[in-house]
Structures are given as structure tokens and as C-alpha cells.
Image (tube, helix red, strand yellow):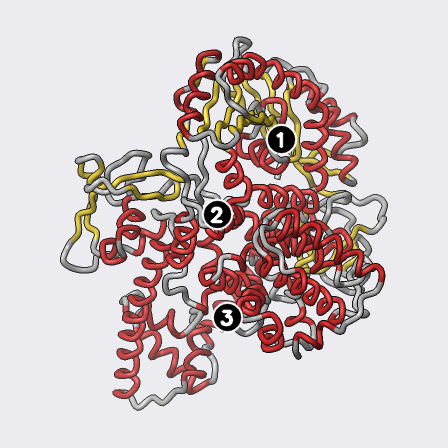
Amino acid sequence: MTRSDVAIVELDKEQKRHLGELLDVCNTHLEYVDEEMIRDAFALACHSHKGVTRASGEPYYIHPLEVAKIVASELSIDGESVVAALIHDTVEDTDVTLTDVRDVFGPVVANLIDGVTKIEGVFKNRQSKQAETFMKLILSMADDIRVVLIKFADRLHNIRTLQHLPREKQMKIASETLDLYAPLAHRFGLYQIKNEFEDLCFKLLDPNSYNFVARKLREKKAAREAFISEFMEPIEEELRDHGLTFEIKGRPKHIYSIYRKMQRQQKPFEEIYDLFAIRIILEDPHTKEDCWRVYSMITDWYTPIPKRFRDFISVPKANGYQSLHTTVITKSGQRVEVQIRTRRMDEIAERGLAAHWKYKEGGQSGSQTLEQFVSWVREVLDTPRPEAATEFVKDFQLNLYQDEIYVFTPKGDLKTLPRGASCIDFAFEIHSEVGERAMAAKINGKLVPLRQKLKIGDQVDIVTGPKVNVNPDWIEDVVTHKAKARIRQYVRQRQREVSDKGREAWEKRAKRNNIELSDQELMKVSHQLGFDSLQVMFFDIGAEKYDIGKLYRAVKDFKSKGRLEKEEEQKELESILMPTLEEVGEKFTREAKKGINDQSLLIDGGLNHVKYHFANCCNPIPGDEVMGFISRTGDVKIHRTSCKNAIHLMNSDGERILEATWARTPDMQFLAAIKLVGEDRVGLINDLTDVLSKSLKTNMKSINVSSDSGVFEGIVTLYVSDLRHLDQIMEKLKRVQGIRTAHRFE
């Protein structure tokens, strides 16, 4: 393929209109636009995807077109990124090769597309394709930071149009995005994209909770705007008197963050006070010194809360975020968060990584933060093990949302660590060898255990020894990926050494007694003895946790009879006397869901003869959004889509997810629980049971209550017919005198 081959592609009237819209966007937001190259890339996208439609029914080329618009307008990267966005799916989905792209558009565009493209077989572990894709994205990002920006744009448009896909695909993609891409966007300062990711995914995964918070925000909008106007009136006047040009924003926090705070603090919406923040943005050429002047003006009018002051200008976050944060109290006693920053700081705060790229390309100062990003990525990728993609992603996620603390070395060098980091994390942050040889630590000159958690401003000195001193238990005391990876590496190495010792001991015993047994046969014996693998068995032998004589007798038994008679008899006896967890779960399900039958749910559009169980972790009832998950035994577990376990399963084993919908089956009863909080008083229990016994024919199973200092808490377990029935009961309970909150207990 050559440039001339692409140039002769004819566009129809609608395609020409779309191309014109894209060029207008590029010319508005980008400093330099190669219109001919963008036209050729658009023509290739139209030609390659000709006849292909999306789930919405529109031509497929609309997707790369919209991704290119996001790259140009919302991220404002550069023309090469726009070209890569236009043809990012061609290599994966059409006959166009990377060589073709390189020949027509050059090596830079080809490398960008290669980084974005999802490929299979890069990593050995097949447990999670999503983990593999994510790792490849991160690896590519270390070479060219624009890769992740294009990927974010691609994912953003997919999320915006997710409603056209089947429900189970919606849930899988939404959970992946919430679990991986939203935290990564947060880590890179792409807050606008991160917030949209979270809200759109939250709306899909838990529409009831989303709509509740959204409705509450709409109801308070007028009061919020009036308050902001009143709060800022004296400040605005003083800012103008000092000749400052500025913009004031008073935007509410996004819906998902409010919901998380409600869950974390276990408070209703009405008791969440920091629902919005006032932002004062100083226009160019104002500087950081002017930000401090504004801070002084605000604290002259309102009383600041010292503990809620954060100076991110002097000490920026790792992603380059700069701003002054303060919380003040008005004369009426209301707390208000105020953020003060320059226009450039605001652009970096909103667009993070993309803004850094823009400043770098423009040759402006301060672009060193971009290099810090790349350095951080490479550090995270320090000797990653391809066979542990899922483990890598899990550790990676732990560090993405963490707040940061700032601590100092004995020489005064500043180190940034996640909140909750210990001296062990600090040691590995200094150098891997320091972490491995760490014996003790000094914080501010005082000797402390290595497990000690660090605080902002601590000066830390690590005491090291002459040899490796890694404790496997440290894994519970560290939060950084680097520390976790090094400790796991040591543990695995130690386990291999002990396992090799155990295998060597067995081979000597077998040789001495003329026993010949293949590893396959030995594996059968190990399984019958209760071990998950040969390595585990040899480890226990090497660590002297398991008597090698027992293995010898078991092997002799196996060689003579082909099975372990005693062990099998014992297992049979145990299965009779002690039910398995699965059997216990099934018993609970039968008790809790009386009258259940095969017509309760439609699995994957109506599959017949599918054995399914309701998950005990979330107890779904009719009206709940549900999904099916194929277990290792082949039956199906039914979860609520908002269940934390379900979200994890969708992310790690998405190919085993099935669509599930409720069938209309009368007279079914499902177990549910309601948590009550209120003021304790005489007769409260009687009033509650009276309401429950008379309310909509409700059959109560149990009620558990506790009272402390006049505060009543209780959990009521009862049978309901569906979600509507449960909501009706909760509304009735809220009307009981003294009850403050009544919500579904999970």
C-alpha cells in the first residue's frame, strides 16, 4: 500500500461532511495540522471498514472519527495522534498491516498504533486477557506517552456508546473501565476523563444508586448556586480591587465520588457536606505568588481549618498537580473547600498528562514532569513477570488511587510515597538492595520497627545489615508495587530452594528403596494426600512440615493397589459426616429462597436445564440487575451486577459471564436484610415487629439489635417477593418514630 493508493479513495457526501467537522476541530485545538495526512487517514478508515456497522447501526468509521475528535479537542495532543486514532482499529480488524501504515504514514504513527492495538499471545498466562492488554498498554506507554492518551480516548467513546451492546458486555466493559482505566486516569491527572469514566460506569453497573445521587444533586442545585454567589461576593470585589483577573467555578463533585463517600462514611446524602468545591483560577500572566495573595484574602474573610490546608504548589503531586487547597468556615458554620490556582495549573489539573505533552512540544518550561511520568512507569515495570499479569495489575491498582505523603531522606531529599506506606516501602524506594538488607529504621532520629507507618514530613533513615533480611510477612506491611514485587520474588526464590530440597530428599529415599515412579503418578499420589501440586508437597517435606515416611507408605500403597485405600475411605467418611461449603451454600439457598424453580431466571437468553445458585455474598432478588457466572464445576452462580465479587469476576474472567434476567414467577420468596439506625427508646422493637408483621404480608426470619449511648442499630432478615416489595417495607420502617435510616444490608 502507498500514499497514492489511499489518496484515490472517494468519499461520499456524508463522509466529506464528517471529514470537514474533524478538520475544523483540529484547526481549533491543535497548533499544527497536516490536513492532507488526516484526510488520507480518514479515507483509509472509511475504506477499510466499508460495509461494517457498529452495534448502534451506524457505519463503523464513526467510532475512529469520534476518537480522533476526542484526541484533538479534549486532549489536544498533536496531528500524528489524530491520524493514529483514525486508523487505530484497522490493523486489528482489517487486512491493513503495520507495514502498510508505516509505509503510508511513517514510523511514529505505526508505533502509536502498535501500542494501542490489542494483541493476543504476548504473555504466557491466559488467565486474564484484559490484564495482558493492560500490561501491554503500560509497556508501550513507557516508549511513547501518547499511546495511553489515545487508548483513553478510544475507551471513552466506547463507554459513551455502551448502551447499544448486550447487557453482559456492558457490565464487563464498565467493570474493566472502573477497575483499571479510571484509576490510571486518576494517577496521570486526567481528572475530566477519570470522572466521566466513573460516572458512566457507575450509571451502568448500579443505575438505582446513580439516579438517587443525581436526583439529590439536582434538588440542591439552586441552593448551591445561591450559596456560592453569596460566599464569593466579598472575595470577588477584593480581587478586582487588587487588579487580578480571574474565573470562579463552583462545580459539584461527580456522582460516583459522592456515592463512595456515602458508602465509606456510612452516612446518608444529607450528611455529606463537601458536595462541591469553589475554584478560583487566575488568568495569565498571574503567578504562584498571586495564588498566595488570594489565599490571604479568603482567610481574612473566613476562618480557615488548619488541618484542611494543602500546599500542592510548593510540593506538587507526582502527576504534576498544583493548587492551594483550604477549607474555611462561614459565619453560619458551613464548611467550604476552596481551590486556588493559575490557568496553567488548572489545565494540568484537568488534563494532566495531555497538558504536560502540550507544554513539552511547545518547548515550555516545566515539562520535566512528563519525564517523571515515564520514569515512574518504567519503575513500576521493573522486572515484571509476564506469567503473572493478573498479579501485576492487582498491585498496580493498589497504588493508583492512593493519596500521597512526602517524607525525607537523612540528607533532606524528598520522596513521594502512597499514604499508608511503611519504612519497608521507603527502604525499597531508596534501592532494592536497601530494602532487602533492612534491619531497622529511624524516624526523626528515633528507632522504630520497620513496619512503622510513615507520616507527612517524617525524616527516615534505614539501618541495613550485611546480608539479605527479607521477611515474607512484610508483604502485609507494604503498599507499593516495587516493595511487593521484590518481597514476592524473594519468597518464590526461597520456596523453590526448599522445594528442591524436599524433592532431593524424596529422590534419595526412592532410590534407596528401588521405587520408580513418574512425576505424573507421583502427582496423583500428592493430590490424594491433599496437596494442590508436587511443588507444594516437596516444599512441606523440605520445610519438615510433612513426614517423608508418610509419602513413602502412600507410594507403596499406590504401587500395589493403584489407589490410596485408607485416604479414600477417610474422605468418604468425612463427606458423610461433614458437608462441604457448596452443600452448606445450597442448603442456605433452599431455605432462603422457598419455592424457587427452574423458571425463576432466564440464563443467556433462555438456556434450559442450567443448574444455578444464588450467590450468598449479595443475595439477589427480583428487580435487581443480575448476571450469571460459570463456576469451575460447570454450574452458574447468580450475582447482583453491583456486587463487588461480580465486578471482580467480570474483570478477571469476563469470558465466563452469562446474561441473566428474571422470569415472571408468582409466589416466590427471597431472603433480604435491612439495616436500621436510629434513636433507642422504650417500645421501639415492638413497633418495628408490629410494622413488619402487618406490612404487606412480610415473613420475618430474624432481628438482631444493639444499643449504645442511646443509638439503636439493628439488622432485620426477612422474606420478600421482589425489589419493589423490599423498597415498600423500608419506606414503612423509616416512618417508625426514632428510625433515622433504613437501607438494604449487603
Q: Is residue 429 left or right of residue 340?
A: left
- Image coordinates of residue 362 in percent, x first then y, are 49, 50
- Mark 3, residue position: 125
10 Å crowding of disc 3: few (<14), some (14-19), many (20+): some
- Mark 2, residue position: 359
Q: In the figure, residue 745 lies in which quadrant?
A: top right
Q: Is residue 365 left or right of residue 611?
A: left
Q: Is residue 568 left or right of residue 365?
A: right
**Which of the two discs, 1 and 2, labels the residue nearer the N terminus?**
2
Q: In the figure, residue 675 lies in which quadrant?
A: top right
Amino acid type indicated by mark 2: Tyr
**Which of the two discs, 1 and 3, labels the residue nearer the N terminus?**
3
- What's the distance in space between the residues labelled 1 and 2, CA to CA? 52 Å
Amino acid type indicated by mark 3: Asn
- Mark 1, residue position: 675
Residue at 35% x, 76% y is 551
Q: Compared to 114, does 306 lie above or below?
A: above
Task: Quarter of the image for the C terminus: give it.
Answer: top right
Q: Nearer the viewer, mark 2 or mark 3?
A: 2
Element marked by disc 2: helix
Q: Is residue 308 visible?
A: yes
**Which of the two discs, 2 and 3, labels the residue nearer the N terminus?**
3
